[in-house]
Image (tube, helix red, strand yellow):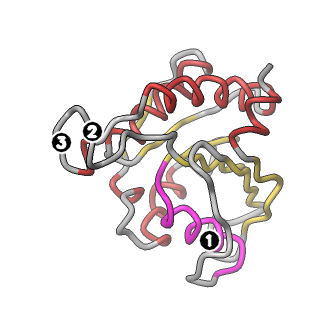
Amino acid sequence: MQLLVIRHGIAEDSTTAATGQDDAGRPLSKEGKRTMKRVAAGLAELIDKLDVIATSPLVRAQQTAQIVAKVYNDLPVETVNALLPENEPSDLLPWLERHASDKIVAVVGHEPHLGFLVTWLMSGQKVSRVALKKGSACLLEFDDKVAGGSATLHWLLTPSELRRIGR
């Protein structure tokens, strides 16, 4: 299985969000939506097909996942609470194990949680050694069992690199 890990796009500033919502309800900014559309186009150049896409319940991640899903023929998006920022990396394992027969799965979430997740999947260590900018993505591969310390990093790209690929 390959796992595409995507950090949500640029969101409205929490102090100026027009929605008046708390942090969980903070949406992507206009720039964030525009940038993520180009990032998604870059992802589609690198990865032909996704089997499933999951996202954190927070609005900015949901919106990012929908933008990515659109370039993959409106792939349905699954909300997964294990992708909330306060969760442990290992909390995502049951969901990943349910999708172990899928070829390529994608998750959309938040930093620093995703940095911890990626590092843990590659090394088994509960530290963050990977920083994902807003709109960045990385591709991991599991040869066998999905577990901490079992993934190999294929690539990690910034949003500007993904936008260039998507031209």
Which picture quadrant has residue 129? bottom right
Q: Magenta stretch containing residue 119, yes or no?
A: yes
Q: Nearer the viewer, residue 76 or 16?
A: 16
Marks 3, 2: nearer the viewer? 2
The residue furthest left is: 20
Provide residue 154's location: percent of width, then percent of height.
83, 54
Label 3: how many residues lie within 10 Å, few (<14), some (14-19) or many (20+)? few
Q: Nearer the viewer, residue 104 or 123?
A: 123
In the picture, the disc for residue 147 is 1
Q: Badge 3 is on which residue?
A: 21
Which picture quadrant has residue 55? top left
Magenta residues, dominant SS class: helix
Marks 1, 3: nearer the viewer? 3
Q: Is residue 19 left or right of residue 63?
A: left
- Indicate the secondary structure of the residue bearing disc 2: loop
User: Is residue 166 in view from this perspective?
Assistant: yes
If the image is split into quadrants, where does the C terminus sit? top right
* Residue type indicated by callout 3: Gln
User: Is residue 1 in view from this perspective?
Assistant: no
* Contact check, label 3 and label 2, Cβ < 8 Å: yes
* Residue type indicated by callout 1: Ala
Label 1: how many residues lie within 10 Å, few (<14), some (14-19) or many (20+)? some
Q: Badge 2 is on which residue?
A: 17
Label 2: how many residues lie within 10 Å, few (<14), some (14-19) or many (20+)? some
In the image, the segment drawn in magenta is 109-124
Spatial CA distance of label 3 from label 2 is: 7 Å
* Residue type indicated by callout 2: Ala
Q: Is residue 106 left or right of residue 55?
A: right
Q: Residue at x 76, y 53 (%)?
A: 156
- Indicate the secondary structure of the residue bearing disc 1: loop
Q: Earlier in the sequence, mark 1 or mark 2?
A: 2
